[in-house]
Image: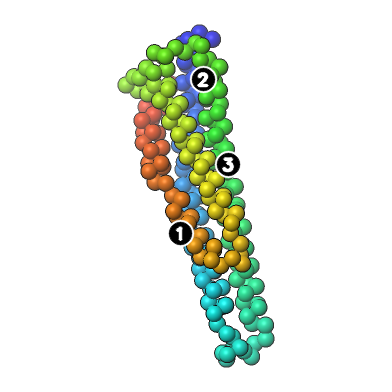
């Protein structure tokens, strides 16, 4: 493949990859927005379970209702399992985002490596008014891929520790989930997408 053809092909792959990152970033943010109320629900359900454990129903007027405590506990466990199931479904969506970005970035890096002999250093480091350098764009894509891979792994690991009967973990889950947010990394990706906007829109 001649140098111009190799560069044209690589630029096309880079455009496709950045468009994928932009689309997937929107999906990722939307899924995390959906997760927020579910995490709040987990915290609320764990508080209700804790309150139920602290109340001696046998010492209240409700003692006349047989098996009330067991039935309430069962309902709370059931509701908690439902929320955990919904969160696991959301993780499947986050995994799809991670996989999509990883596949795109892997493909463009592989294409670059296949054509590295046709692309000398001045070519891959050259910038223009409308296009960042190939080396910069490859680095930015790999940064984005690493961010979503790590974010997915941390959130998945957190959810895997949660059990409906483990109240202390459920109570701390909303704060722990929120602590995983990385606004600086997300802002960096948004800034990157701004930097390549002219490039991705040009053909």
Left or right for 150, reference 189: right
- Residue sticking out furthest to the right: 66
Q: Is residue 85 above or below residue 151?
A: below
Residue occupying image coordinates x 57% and y 85%: 56
Circle 1 SS class: helix
Q: Is residue 23 above or below residue 182?
A: above
Cβ–Cβ under 8 Å for marks 2 and 3: no
Q: Which residue is mark 2?
A: 112
Q: Which residue is mark 1?
A: 175
Q: Looking at the figure, which quarter contains the N terminus? A: top right
Q: Earlier in the sequence, mark 2 or mark 1?
A: 2
Cβ–Cβ under 8 Å for marks 3 and 1: no
Left or right for 48, reference 190: right
Q: Position of residue 49 (x, y in %)?
A: 56, 73
Residue occupying image coordinates x 37% and y 23%: 132
Q: Is residue 19 visible?
A: no
Closer to viewer: mark 2 or mark 1: 1
Q: Looking at the figure, which quarter contains the C terminus? A: top left
Closer to viewer: mark 3 or mark 1: 1
Q: Which residue is mark 3?
A: 96
Q: Is residue 126 visible?
A: yes
Q: Disc 2 to disc 3, how far (Cα)?
A: 24 Å
- Neighbour class for label 1 at 10 Å: few (<14), some, many (≥20)? few
Q: Position of residue 13 (x, y in %)?
A: 50, 24
Q: Which mark is residue 58?
A: none
Q: Is residue 90 above or below residue 3?
A: below
Q: Earlier in the sequence, mark 2 or mark 3?
A: 3
């Amino acid at each position: 493949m001649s140098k111009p053809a190799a560069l044209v092909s690589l630029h096309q792959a880079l455009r496709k990859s950045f468009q994928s990152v932009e689309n997937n970033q929107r999906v990722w943010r939307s899924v995390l927005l959906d997760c927020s109320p579910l995490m709040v629900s987990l915290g609320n359900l764990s508080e209700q379970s804790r309150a139920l454990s602290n109340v001696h129903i046998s010492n209240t007027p409700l003692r006349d209702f047989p098996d009330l405590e067991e039935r309430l506990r069962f309902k709370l466990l059931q509701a908690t399992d439902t929320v955990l199931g919904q969160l696991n479904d959301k993780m499947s969506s986050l995994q799809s985002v991670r996989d999509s970005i990883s596949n795109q970035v892997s493909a463009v890096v592989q294409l670059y490596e296949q054509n590295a002999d046709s692309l000398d250093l001045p070519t891959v480091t050259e910038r223009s008014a409308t296009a960042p350098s190939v080396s910069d764009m490859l680095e930015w894509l790999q940064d984005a891929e690493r961010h979503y891979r790590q974010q997915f792994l941390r959130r998945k690991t957190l959810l895997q520790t949660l059990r409906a009967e483990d109240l202390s973990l459920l109570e701390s889950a909303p704060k722990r989930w929120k602590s995983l947010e990385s606004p600086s990394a997300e802002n960096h990706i948004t800034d990157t997408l701004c930097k390549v906007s002219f490039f991705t829109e040009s053909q």
